[in-house]
Amino acid sequence: MAEKPKSMVLGVVAAAVFAGLGRMVVQKILSDRAARERHLTAPLDQETRAKISEALRTPRK
């Protein structure tokens, strides 16, 4: 008796999922790198620190 040909659907779906996940990982790495390169930090003056602290302490309604 001849063997039944194996379906290639599972292999194709697995390859598509793997490629999609790989693409998502690459996009995340590139976006993190771009965000890190554009991130500029400057020392905060006392007035700005006070405003931030006050905003964090006040309860929201």
Image (tube, helix red, strand yellow):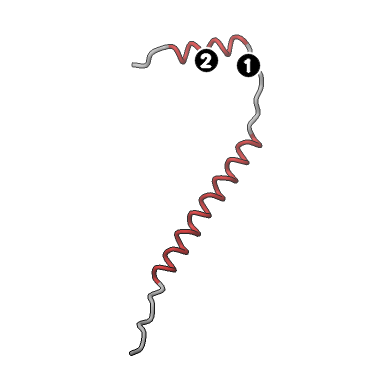
| Residue at the image point whose x is 37% and y is 16% from the top | 60
Horizontal side of 27 relative to 42 (left or right) equals left
Q: Are marks 2 and 1 in contact (CB under 8 Å)?
A: yes
Give left or right: position of 54 versus 41: left
Dot 2 falls on a residue whose secondary structure is: helix
Q: Earlier in the sequence, mark 2 or mark 1?
A: 1
Q: Quadrant of residue 61?
A: top left
Give the label on residue 52, or none. 2
The residue type indicated by label 1 comes to: Leu
Q: Nearer the viewer, residue 3 or 17?
A: 3
Near-viewer residue (39 or 29): 29
Identified at 44% across, 12% down, the residue is 57
Say the numbered circle drawn on residue 44: 1
> Is the residue marked by circle 2 packed among few (<14), some (14-19), or many (20+) residues within 10 Å?
few
Helix, strand or loop for disc 1: loop
Q: CA distance from mark 2 to mark 1?
A: 10 Å
